[in-house]
Image (cartoon, grey):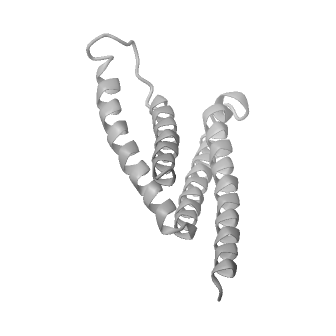
Amino acid sequence: MNPQTQSNQLDRELKSTARRLFVFTGTWVASTALLTFGPRMWWEYDVLTTVLVIALNLLAGAMMLFAFFRHLKSMDELQRQTHLEAMALTLGITMIFTVVYGSLPTVQLLEDAHPTNILFVIGITYILAVARIWMNRTSE
């Protein structure tokens, strides 16, 4: 197989896995919204419905995770290394932020800490880390 054909095949595979990741991430976000707002707004805290939606959310999360792994495998070595380094940086920053954020109510600087706020830190850190690492690598 010539290098151009191989490159086109890798690009097609990367686009395909990116689409799947987008779909499963959207599904997980939608099921999370349903789990968050559904009991109060639509089914008046019916236990069976809530448990089914929790199961749906867990399934959607697992599908998203598998789609991410498949997407990561479809990347070339440089892309994969960039994402792995960004994930390591995100993990470290999230751990430090979580400890500080979790202690704010204890030291009475915040009335209540909401664990879901940490998702914003994770998302923003990961996106910025990927962008910065990629720009550093490709500008050399």
Determine whether, in the image, residue 58 is placed left or right of residue 133: right
**How many numbered marks appear?**
0
Q: Is residue 101 above or below residue 53?
A: above
Determine whether, in the image, residue 125 is placed left or right of residue 24: left
Q: Position of residue 27 (x, y in %)?
A: 68, 50
Quarter of the picture holding the N terminus: bottom right
Residue 46 appears in the rendering? no
Q: Is residue 99 above or below residue 54?
A: above
- Residue drawn at point x = 63 percent, y = 50 percent: 25
Image-quadrant location for residue 92: top left
Q: Position of residue 135 (x, y in %)?
A: 51, 47
Residue 21 appears in the rendering? yes
Q: Nearer the viewer, residue 109 or 13?
A: 13
Residue occupying the far bottom of the picture: 1
Residue occupying the far right of the picture: 42
Q: Is residue 124 above or below residue 9?
A: above
Q: Position of residue 125 (x, y in %)?
A: 46, 38
